[in-house]
């Protein structure tokens, strides 16, 4: 009977161990199935992440190239702007110098004409020996005048005394006044042009 009891005990032990092994096997199989799915999901997520990271990297590289191109363009544009400004400044300075010279000459000529007109109207003697008369002699050469007006002025300015030309002093005064008006108009026009040029440059 002891043998039977031992056999029964061994059978129960073997059965219990078999059940235990079966439980372990079932749990291992469940883990393998679930683990494989989780692993596949992780691999898929990693692949998607890699694709996104690759796309982001390419986009960043393209953006960097564009930024480098933009910086290069800006540098070139800046150099072009500097060159254009230097050229414009040089031109403006040249125009200003021309205006300063021409306006000064016009003002001197206008002053000489004013003195000549005043002297003739007052009948003053000695005018032809003044610097204003010398200026008028040059004007008869430089200004656009009719041949008749030029001849009258040249003849007047070449005489020794303004009194010798008294009979034609009214005509001469008229010519001088017309020259005076023309020069004042020219001076006003060039001054307006200079002011406009300054405004546009600024």
Image (tube, rainbow, N blue to C red):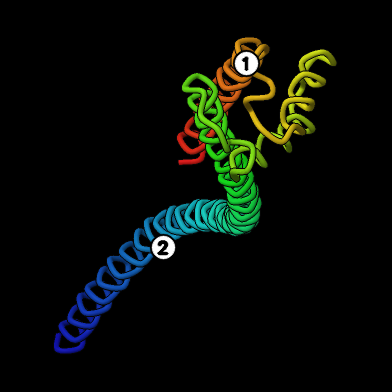
Where is residue 146, by image quadrant?
Answer: top right
Question: Helix, strand or loop at disc 2?
Answer: helix
- Of tags 2 and 1, the one toward the viewer is 1
Q: Residue 152 in the image: x percent, y percent?
A: 77, 18
Name the spot of residue 90 as percent of width and height, x first. Answer: 63, 53
Labels 2 and 1: the sequence-earlier one = 2
Please state the horizontal and vertical placement of residue 198, each as a whole percent of the image.
48, 38
Where residue 157 appears, x then y in whole percent?
72, 31
**Label 2 to label 1: alpha-carbon separation:** 130 Å
**Quarter-of-image position of residue 160:** top right
Q: Residue at x 78, y 27 (%)?
A: 154
| Residue 62 visible somewhere in the drawing | no
Residue bearing the label numbered 1: 169
Looking at the image, residue 33 lies above or below residue 164? below
Residue 5's place in the image compared with 115, above or below, is below
Side (left or right) of 28 relative to 182 = left
> Which residue is nearer to you in this view: 88 or 62?
88
Q: Which is nearer the eye, 196 or 129?
A: 129
Residue furthest to the front: 164
State the residue at coordinates (19%, 86%): 6
Residue designated by label 2: 32
* 40 sits left or right of 157 in the view: left
Q: Is residue 29 above or below residue 111?
A: below
3 relative to 169, above or below: below
Residue 14 in view here: yes
- Residue in front for this viewpoint, 86 or 143: 143
Indicate the secondary structure of the residue bearing disc 1: helix
- Seen as rendered, the residue at the extreme right is 147
Quadrant of the snapshot with the N terminus: bottom left
């Amino acid at each position: 009977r002891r043998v039977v009891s031992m056999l029964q005990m061994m059978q129960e032990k073997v059965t219990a161990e078999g059940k235990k092994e079966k439980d372990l096997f079932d749990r291992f199989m469940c883990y393998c199935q679930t683990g494989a799915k989780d692993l596949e999901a992780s691999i898929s997520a990693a692949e998607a992440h890699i694709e996104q990271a690759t796309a982001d990297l390419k986009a960043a590289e393209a953006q960097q190239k564009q930024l480098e191109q933009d910086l290069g363009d800006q540098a070139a544009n800046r150099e072009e702007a500097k060159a254009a400004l230097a050229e414009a400044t040089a031109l403006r300075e040249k125009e200003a110098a021309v205006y300063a010279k021409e306006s000064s000459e016009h003002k001197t000529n206008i002053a000489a004409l004013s003195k000549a007109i005043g002297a003739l109207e007052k009948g003053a003697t000695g005018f032809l020996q003044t610097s204003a008369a010398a200026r008028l002699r040059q004007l008869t050469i430089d200004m656009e005048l009719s041949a008749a007006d030029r001849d009258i002025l040249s003849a007047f300015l070449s005489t020794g005394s303004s009194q010798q030309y008294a009979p034609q002093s009214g005509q001469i005064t008229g010519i001088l006044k017309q020259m005076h008006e023309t020069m004042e108009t020219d001076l006003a026009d060039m001054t307006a042009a200079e002011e406009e040029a300054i405004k546009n440059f600024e």
